[in-house]
Amino acid sequence: ATAAGTMGGTKTPVVLSATDQTLVANAPLGSALTLNLDYTIPAAKSSSSDILGKPAGTYTQTVTYTATAL
């Protein structure tokens, strides 16, 4: 996932996993800020058995975001 939007700070692309990762660091205080996320499937995965050969249908996944003050 990569991030954009009106939220400042240092944005870092991450690979989704069960491990906690920092998506934005050093974001300034404020409200009504946006964080736009883009999700992509890397080329190496898009042509692998991780994607190909799966039954047609709708797949869902829960992604959890936690905002913390450090």
Image (cartoon, rainbow, N blue to C red):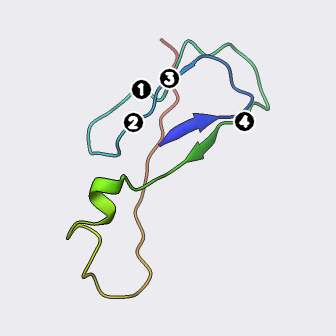
Report the Cα–Cα distance between label 2 and label 4: 18 Å
Report the Cα–Cα distance between label 4 and label 3: 16 Å
Amino acid type assigned to the residue bearing label 4 in the image:
Thr
Q: Which tag, 1 or 2, sits closer to the chain's start?
A: 2
Percent position of residue 58, x then y: 44, 81
Residue labelled with disc 3: 68
**Residue sitting at x 50%, y 51%:** 39
| Residues at circles 2 and 3 in contact by the CB criterion of under 8 Å | no
Residue labelled with disc 1: 22
Amino acid type assigned to the residue bearing label 1 in the image:
Thr
Q: Which tag, 4 or 1, sits closer to the chain's start?
A: 1
Residue 50 versus residue 56 in the image, above or below = above
Instruction: Kindly give the residue lying farthest to the bottom in the view shown.
Output: 56
The one nearer the camera, 55 or 59, is 55
| Residues at circles 1 and 2 in contact by the CB criterion of under 8 Å | yes
How crowded pointer 1 is (Cα within 10 Å; few <14, some 14-19, many 20+) is rated as: few
Residue 20 versus residue 48 in the image, above or below = above
Q: Which tag, 2 or 4, sits closer to the chain's start?
A: 2
Q: Nearer the viewer, mark 1 or mark 3?
A: 1
Number of the label disc, if any, that sits on residue 14: 2
Residue labelled with disc 4: 34
Left or right: 7, with 51 as reference point: right
Left or right: 68, with 6 as reference point: left
**Residue sitting at x 69%, y 26%:** 7
Amino acid type assigned to the residue bearing label 2 in the image:
Val
Q: Which tag, 1 or 3, sits closer to the chain's start?
A: 1
Percent position of residue 32, x then y: 79, 32
Report the Cα–Cα distance between label 1 and label 3: 10 Å
